[in-house]
Structures are given as C-alpha cells and as structure tokens.
Amino acid sequence: MIKMNKKLILILLVLVVSANLWAQKAADLSKNVLFIGNSYMQVNDLPSLTRNAASSAGYELTYRANMPGGATFANHCTNGSREMILEGGWDVVMIQGQSQEPSFPDGQVAQQTLPYAAQLVEAVYQANPCGEPMFYMTWGRKEGDSYNAQFLALMRVWIVCYIFAI
C-alpha cells in the first residue's frame, strides 16, 4: 500500500508539473499588443499584419490600437492613448510619432517631442511591469522633406530621437 501511494504521489507530481509547464508555454504563446501611432500604422494595417505574422509562427496575438492620422507623441499623451497604456495588461506597446517630428530644430524636439515620448514610455513601465515599449520608426521621404530635412539627415535624427526617448 505504501509503495502504491508513493507511485500515485509521483504520478500526480509529474502531472501537476506537466500541466504547469503546458500552461506556461500556452501563456508564452499569447501576447497582448497595443499599437499607438498614426496613418503610417493605420493605412498599412500594421496591427493585422503583425497578428497574421505572429499566427503563422504559432503565437496568438490580441491587440488594440489608437492610430489617428498625423498624431504626434504629444497628441498621444492627451487623445486616449496614454489611458489605454495605463489600463495595463500589455506585453508590448508599439509607439509611433509623427514622421517629421525629429527633423524639427533641436530646441523644438527637446520641448515638443522627447518629453512626450518619455511620458508614454513611463506609462508603459508604470502599468505593465513586464511590458516592453517599442518604437515604430518611420522612414524618411526618398525625395527629402523640403520644410525640415533631407532623407539621410531625417533618418539619423529619428534614430537618435528614439534612442534617447527610451
């Protein structure tokens, strides 16, 4: 009888550990993503493209999005995006600013872009302890931007801007 109890306990232990590992694996394959951006995300339907790519790799991706055209980081701090972040439960928060923002003069970027990007990142960490903010870097225009910067300069500024926002 004692041998049988030991076997039964061992079997139950193996089942409990296996069930726990299976549940962890299932949880690891499920991700919640919040997309915060503008028309670059919206027109290309980046959330659906990402969900489909994740699905083809065996992941289940659920998402919500706020992608009004032309939205800047400052807009996202007041248009409901920040509140969506603070709801919590996000594994990843994809953040995209208006494509010309970093090409503005340094002082303008320091006052009107970086503080708001930082606020969004702080909100991610505040409400989503295991969440990751990820910046969706838009591209410079091939023919440049006659009002702000040429292609290579714009790309350089975007990279620097995103590095310092995190």
Image: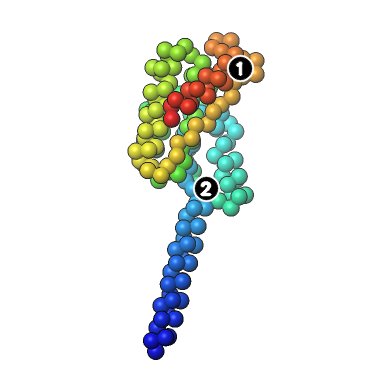
**The one of 162 and 85 positioned closer to us in this rendering:** 162
Residue 117 percent coordinates (x, y)? 42, 27
User: Please, is residue 116 above or below residue 89 in the view?
Assistant: above
Q: Earlier in the sequence, mark 2 or mark 1?
A: 2
Q: Secondary structure at mark 2?
A: strand
Q: Nearer the viewer, residue 107 or 53?
A: 107
49 horizontally vs 23: left or right:
right
The residue labelled by disc 2 is 61
Q: Nearer the viewer, residue 41 or 29?
A: 29
Q: Residue at x 57, y 36 (%)?
A: 45
**On the picture, is 93 further left or further right than 142?**
left
Q: Position of residue 106 (x, y in %)?
A: 45, 13
Mark 2 is surrounded, within 10 Å at the Cα level, by few (under 14), some (14 to 19) or many (20 or more) other residues, namely some
Locate residue 50: give its quadrant.
top right
Q: Quadrant of the N terminus?
A: bottom left
For this rendering, which residue is in front, 58 or 10? Answer: 10
Single out the residue that lies furthest toward the left: 126
Residue 158 pos. (x, y %): 52, 22
Contact check, label 2 and label 1, Cβ < 8 Å: no
Farthest bottom residue? 1
- Amino acid under disc 1: Phe
Residue at coordinates 37% horizontally, 29% vertically from top-left? 119
Name the quarter where the C terminus is drawn.
top left
Q: Residues within 10 Å of mark 1 (few under 14, many from 20)?
A: some
Report whether residue 88 is seen.
no
The residue indicated by pointer 1 is: 151
Image x and y of residue 97, in percent: 48, 26
Residue at coordinates 50% horizontally, 57% vertically from top-left? Answer: 25
Label placed on residue 51: none
